[in-house]
Image (cartoon, rainbow, N blue to C red):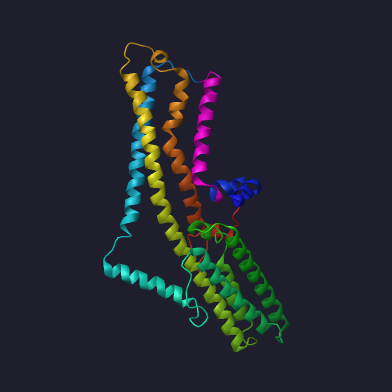
Amino acid sequence: MVAELRTFRESPQRWVYLVGSRPVVGVGLFAAFLSIFYGLYAVGLVRVQNPTAILYVLSSLVGGNLTLVTLVITINQVIISRQLGSPGELREEIENVNEFRERLFDSEDRQVVPVTPSDFLKVVLENVRRDLQRLGGLTADAADDGLREDANRLVTDLTDHVDTVTTLIEESESGTFNTLSVLLTTNYADRIYQLRRLKSSYRESLSDEATAALEEVVAGLQETDVARQYFKTLYIQTELAYVSRVLLYAGVVSETVLLSALLVLSSSSGTTTPEALPPAVAPGLAAVGLLPLSVLFSYVLRLAVVTQRTVAITPFTTPEQEDELDV
């Protein structure tokens, strides 16, 4: 919570797009709808007088919300269906994940591999940092001045990056998204390219040990990117399941309120709209009708940003991933 407040003060846009609590963002958008509609009513631009128009608006909101909720639930069912499988398929998936986890660590150094995303990523970064320091030590006394300077600059830059990410993980709360969020500003494709260009440019000057250390760093960065993509998969599946549940809650509330108002207006034939429906209630009904949209907006906005920032995997990158995350 403290980290969220600090981010909100430093970058409100980043808070809305990524860091902020999704229910809070959704409630904020709903409050904005209320303010806009009641503002229009207060200045006299909205007049509740035509019952036919009100019935049309309410009917449109009822039908639109039913379509919206049904569509999101359908998409969620498709995601859930991908998690179903036979015992053999599930066993193979577990073995593949275990193989990936165990491949990153030396069994003699670490008998138990962390199971939480944050702890797992910290250990991966510790290994990358260890290999970076080894590479830096092997190139510090190189006879080639260019190799020594370029290697030192690259090792320093990558070490600072690893330290920054590790600090962010330690400061943030544990969880799949919190772990994933600290990796959204990384560009491992570019860093791997720099390492391989260093190897190509100074092939004759690099010792066999330094070359092996460089390849270990590249392999560590590639595995970190694999972990990031896997965490993204877990996050998207979890988030879609959660947003479907919240959207159902919001949809039930919205449809109940809208249908109640629609029934009241439909049963009050022969009376004017202000008599059947108090004018001050109409802006509130319009905002309630947009409640499911507020919920969907708050969650899909972050899903879209995460997907955009991780759409390409190593060794490729995109212009969106090249840019700093300053949304």
- Give the image quarter of residue 255: top left
Spot occupied by residue 187 in the image (x, y as percentages of width and height): 57, 64
* The stretch drawn in magenta includes residue 263: no
Magenta highlight range: 19-45
Magenta span contains residue 29: yes
Quarter of image, res 238: bottom left
In x, y percent, where is residue 89?
Answer: 29, 68
Q: Nearer the viewer, residue 31 or 186?
A: 31
The percent position of residue 201, horizontal first and vertical second, equals 63, 80
Q: Residue furthest top?
A: 270
Q: Residue at x 50, y 27 (%)?
A: 37
Q: Residue at x 50, y 38 (%)?
A: 27
Residue 106, how many percent across, how many down? Answer: 50, 80
Residue 9 sits above or below residue 156 on the image: above
Viewer-side residue, 244 vs 13: 244
Q: Tell me which residue sits at (44%, 64%) in the image.
A: 230
**Type of secondary structure dominating the magenta stretch:** helix
Residue 60 visible here? no
Determine the residue positioned at 50% across, 50% down: 302
Q: 48 and 98: which one is in front?
A: 98
Q: Is residue 8 above or below residue 252?
A: below
